[in-house]
Image (cartoon, rainbow, N blue to C red):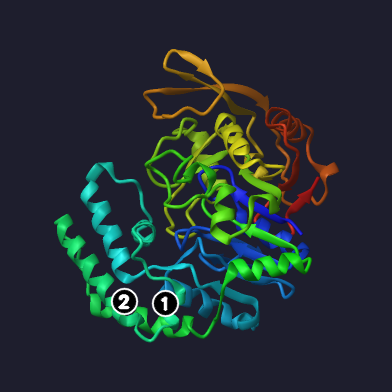
Amino acid sequence: MAVDLLLGLQWGDEGKGKIVDVLTQDYDIIARFQGGPNAGHTLEFDGIKHVLHTIPSGIFHKNAVNVVGNGVVIDPVIFKKELDALKKFNLDINSKLFISRKAHLILPTHRLLDAASEASKGKAKIGSTLKGIGPTYMDKTGRNGMRIGDLELSDWKEKYRSLANKHEAMINFYDVDIQYDLAELEADFFKAVEELKLLTFIDSEEYLYQAQKAGKKILAEGAQGSLLDIDFGTYPFVTSSNTTAAGACTGLGVAPNQIGAVKGIFKAYTTRVGSGPFPTELFDEDGETMARVGNEFGATTGRPRRCGWLDLVALKYAVRVNGVTELMMMKGDVLSGFNKLKICTAYHYKGEQIEHFPYNIEAENVTPVYSEMDGWKEDLTNMTSADQLPKALNEYIAFLEKELEVPIKIVSVGPDRTQTILK
């Protein structure tokens, strides 16, 4: 049984959590393959809004097992807060949530290192969420990180102390004013670790292999977005992991020839949180309207998201890099009321017009080239079937499908799981 993938195709915040929640009824296992608590997957149903950071978005479904894969980095303190928030829903967490022994741990000093590094950059800061993600992946590639499996060893606190001491020396090297009480941070960390140890740790690559052999249906859930990929994103304004389809293989131990459908999610417009280039960003009333109507604030940080027209050059790039086989378009309802919609179909780049995503998309190199289409006035939020969608929206969808050469299978018309139209 092949493993299907679901991932974001822009700069994150596309609505992956909602779609995983919608699709989970068709799967036995939801497996998160990269990133850390810098992710914020928002789910809304039964009048309640839920935000998950590390736990996979299938956790509210009784039929699905949720796996945190080896490619994920875990902050026990944030993980404990997520678990505490789930207690009132009477979920059988011990039988529904498994963690890979090979997943790396975010230590309190990783977060402090993140803050020190960002502060030292001044105006050149990258917009880190300051969750310690980057330093944790640095320790992983530096081959001295701590993993979930280490918590099963009797001397794990000795390993922790050695690494924390190294981090404190590095913090001092940055020579910035970072105020902290490590003893207090460690008290919270050790308490959270003890609760984390009550969960089931697994050799996730073996678990998923046996599940495939048994015919279980598996959906791999990505975090962040393709344009934040450490290799293929807008470096250095990226995250610290591979957010593209290839990351599912390394982040779960799934072989490339076992990948099935690749489901790509994008917004009907474009948003970005934090620093970094954004060719179609709007600084006018249209951008303000998108932000207000779309409630564009980060689920993890609360930071306002920058908004702009749909960038088809960047979207084509993400579709190709990931090998996307089907698309889901989110927040079509936010564009209701615009008389005209613009779509970036090419860039003016260093004196020529191009249609591919170049090495550098900074504003001094790139100017977007737009096509214009009619907008729609209808309120989409109460529509329940594809035949109710307005003509102008169907034309918008048809244009995108022709350009991307991939079908759009789902159109989201609101945040609730019921506001989801299958095409």
Task: Name the residue located 27 percent from the left edge and 64 percent from the top edge.
Answer: 112
Q: Quadrant of residue 332?
A: top right
| Residue annotated with mark 2 | 159
Residue 100 lies left or right of residue 110; in this view the side is: right
Residue drawn where x is 27% and y is 42% of the image: 124
Residue 375 is at least partly visible in this image: yes
- Residue 302 is situated, as x and y percent measured from the top left of the image, at 44, 57
Q: For the point 85% across and 42% down, which residue is it? A: 387
Inter-mark Cα distance, 2 to 1: 9 Å
Q: Where is residue 13 in the image (x, y as percent from the top left)?
A: 54, 50
Secondary structure beneath dot 2 equals helix
Residue 186, disc:
none
Q: Which quadrant does the C terminus fall into?
A: top right
Q: Where residue 116 appears, x then y in whole percent?
A: 24, 57
Badge 2 density bin: few <14, some 14–19, many ≥20, Cα 10 Å: some
Amino acid under disc 2: Lys
Are the residues at dot 2 and dot 1 in contact (C-beta closer than 8 Å)? Answer: yes
* 203 or 86, nearer to the observer: 203
